[in-house]
Image (cartoon, rainbow, N blue to C red):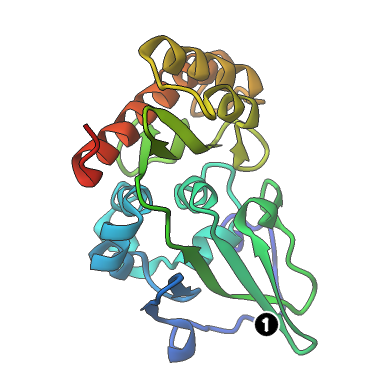
């Protein structure tokens, strides 16, 4: 994408898509490891992704066209570092980490620290993204993803992923991540804090959406206005929380 838009003009390009060591989905006791060159279509068809990380699964299903998902990789989607990247908010709320490798060794970073600006990442010269690790979520966790765009194939005007755990009648471990509303995908930490440890009443969910809309830093561009993004954020954050709560009750059997 960066080359197509002439943002970068490298002297040499290396195709890594046929390296089998970068193309895998491995489910283990602590979570799922995904090779950076794993195509989105393969992730869309993965039973482990659909079962364990439904918000990520939905985000991938809503991305572009089948033809694009057959070619695009999860590593490419992250390294492009678009503020509107659909995989970023779900990975952030699930607490995913990326593995970066170079001749000097390996290091890992939380996905939310991977993005440093539009089109920019925390990768150092000589590093490449090799793996994404997503930890298993606690029992009683529900999650959801919502995207607002002109068409299903379009970049998001706003997207949001949420995850939370119900204990009794209160919400804990609340995570809300938004895309296309700031220079990088971002956590709505004040909104999270407003719900943490409290019963998720309808009035509170609406208030959480309002708080999230106050935290974001949207701009006006060719896809939308800043004002529209704020108004939409109020609605879809509350909607995503309702959906996540519904998943806990249906999947987890919470009364």
Does dot 1 land on a helix, a strand or a loop?
loop
Q: Is residue 156 visible?
A: no
Q: Nearer the viewer, residue 238 or 19?
A: 238
Residue 119, position in %: x, y? Answer: 66, 52
Q: Nearer the viewer, residue 153 or 59?
A: 59
List the residue tagged with mark 1: 12
Q: Is residue 151 visible?
A: yes
Q: Residue at x 35, y 24 (%)?
A: 239
Residue 210, position in %: x, y? Answer: 53, 14
Horizontal side, residue 57 vs residue 104: left or right: left
Q: Nearer the viewer, residue 46 or 5?
A: 46
Q: Residue at x 46, y 48 (%)?
A: 90
| Image quadrant where one finds the N terminus | bottom right
Residue 187, position in %: x, y? Answer: 61, 37
Name the outermost residue toward the top.
203
In the picture, residue 95 is in which quadrant?
bottom right
Q: Residue at x 58, y 25 (%)?
A: 191
Badge 1 crowding class, 10 Å Cα cut-off, few under 14, some 14 to 19, many 20 or more, is few
Horizontal side, residue 73 vs residue 103: left or right: left
Residue 159, position in %: x, y? Answer: 45, 35
Name the outermost residue toward the front.
168
In the picture, residue 28 is in which quadrant?
bottom left
Horizontal side, residue 47 vs residue 199: left or right: left
| Image quadrant where one finds the C terminus | top left
């Amino acid at each position: 994408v960066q080359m197509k838009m002439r943002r970068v003009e490298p002297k040499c390009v290396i195709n890594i898509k046929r390296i089998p060591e970068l193309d895998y989905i491995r489910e283990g006791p602590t979570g799922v490891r995904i090779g950076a060159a794993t195509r989105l279509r393969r992730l869309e068809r993965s039973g482990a992704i659909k079962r364990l990380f439904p918000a990520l699964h939905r985000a991938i299903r809503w991305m572009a066209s089948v033809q694009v998902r057959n070619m695009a990789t999860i590593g490419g989607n992250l390294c492009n570092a678009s503020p509107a990247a659909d995989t970023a908010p779900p990975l952030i709320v699930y607490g995913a980490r990326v593995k970066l490798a170079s001749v000097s060794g390996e290091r890992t970073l939380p996905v939310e620290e991977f993005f440093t600006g539009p089109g920019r990442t925390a990768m150092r010269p000589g590093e490449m993204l090799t793996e994404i690790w997503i930890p298993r979520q606690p029992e009683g966790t529900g999650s959801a993803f919502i995207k607002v765009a002109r068409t299903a194939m379009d970049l998001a005007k706003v997207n949001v992923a949420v995850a939370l755990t119900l204990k009794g009648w209160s919400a804990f471990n609340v995570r809300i991540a938004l895309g296309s509303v700031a220079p990088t995908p971002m956590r709505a930490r004040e909104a999270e804090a407003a719900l943490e440890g409290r019963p998720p009443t309808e009035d509170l969910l609406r208030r959480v959406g309002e708080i999230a809309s106050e935290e974001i830093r949207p701009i006006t561009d060719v896809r939308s206005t800043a004002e529209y993004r704020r108004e939409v954020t109020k609605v879809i954050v509350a909607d995503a929380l309702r959906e996540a709560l519904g998943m806990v009750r249906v999947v987890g059997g919470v009364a």
